[in-house]
Image (spheres, rainbow, N blue to C red):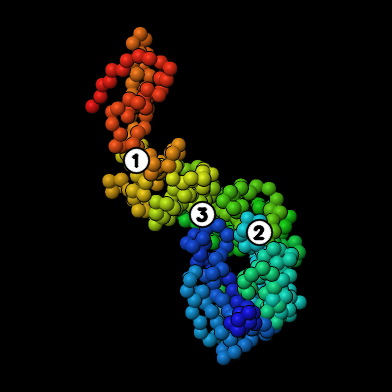
Amino acid sequence: MSQAEVEDRLYTVIKVARSEDLVQQIGNDIYIDLVDHDKVCSFRDKHTPFNLFKWFSPCERSYLLSVSNVQMFSCNIGKITEVFGIPVQYQRFWLWAKRKNHTYRPIQPLTPLEEAQPVGQLREVSNTVNDAELKLFLEVELGQVGQLREVSNTANDAELKLFLEVELGQDLRPVPPLAKTKSDILLFFKLYDPFKEELRYVGRMFVKRSGLPIEVLPMIKKMAGFGPDEEIELYEEIRFEPAVMCEHIDKINGDIIYLQKLSEIGTEQYRYPDVPSFLEYVHNRQSKLHNYDDVVERVAHHLSLDDRSKIRLTSHNCYFQQPIPHPIKYRGVEHLTDMLLHYNQTSDILYYEVLDIPLPELQGLKKLEVAFHHATKDEVVIHTIRLPKQSTIGDALDDLKTKFRGKAFPFNCWYDA
């Protein structure tokens, strides 16, 4: 093991997600789940007790801020209080758990006993119980840092991910976190606006595990900025298949609920009138910068087709609402935007067909349609033959004769111009 690797094992990267991160990312960077942990504030710390972590002076701590997926810069910082402006007594941190659908949700607040543990140990315990990395949500409070980390993740990266929960009073200043009982669960809410085709985070709320949605509807409406008489529809986020929520809440910490006005659902003036249709659109949406290979690869994957070269694409005619006459040649366009463009009109429709041979091979062939008129019958049979473009009429006749093997009669050929 190199010196750098030995040194690395002495440190833990602590990633802290806050409500501000959810507001900034949901509807912009992400739609499903709550946050991209590569884009939240990160601290690099030696394996010191976590509850001491909050009190180091600026000269004793290195700070890493994730500004993008690939960029980070470091500077000196002081206490967490100085970074976030949240007094310690108003902080409550949550562990993140990885679910079966590969999303991460805050699962439980750190207890005083867990805060006293080394970060590496905490990460280990969390991974055993919840199959998760040590991700923490800062509700707005935290033992040696290195052991805490292992509660959440035995597997690979030396990261501790937290969620910081902060409660604000009427004057928008931090107040002590609300008391939480075993029957309370923490839910997160996203609001969908079909007019703007916009999804945004509107807040979180503690509800009773056995409660009914109707019991918390007034608070949900207020959170979304709706009037008390506004009817709303609630959905639970389950991958890309939200289900209408109409029974007992019966949820667990970290569940995500979508809401929208009931009057908007089913309205024909909107392209995506409800949450399921909007999420389906987001799920199917592709980057405009995808190249030809990217697009056919995704189509082939969706069709469970092994050979993507057997996919042929055709652009959409925006004026006549049908495929254009000529398909797209193999790697004939550079980007998806080029495939969707038709006479300065951009469409969101693309046609595909599955060929029996690879498209590059097909493009090297000439397709001929031969109408066979029987000498004694009125029926006409159309035969399609494919030959290399350099083939002669004689080659075409030889190929055609194979279709009538065992039969002997003269051929008269006409060319239809």
Which quadrant of the figure contains the C terminus? top left
- In percent of width and height, residue 266 lies at 50, 42
Q: Based on the displayed image, in which of its 4 quarters is residue 182 positioned?
A: bottom right
Which secondary structure, mark 1? loop
Residue highlighted by disc 3: 192
Q: Amino acid at mark 3?
A: Tyr
In three-dimensional space, the C-alpha distance between marks 1 and 3, rounded to whole angstroms, equals 50 Å
The label shown at residue 99 is: 2
The label shown at residue 364 is: 1
Residue at 30% over, 34% down: 391
Q: Left or right? Give the position of 163 relative to 184.
A: left
In three-dimensional space, the C-alpha distance between marks 3 and 2, rounded to whole angstroms, equals 24 Å
- In percent of width and height, residue 118 lies at 71, 79
Residue at 68% over, 61% down: 253
In this view of the protein, can residue 25 be seen by the observer?
A: yes
Which secondary structure, mark 3? strand
In this view of the protein, can residue 8 be seen by the observer?
A: no
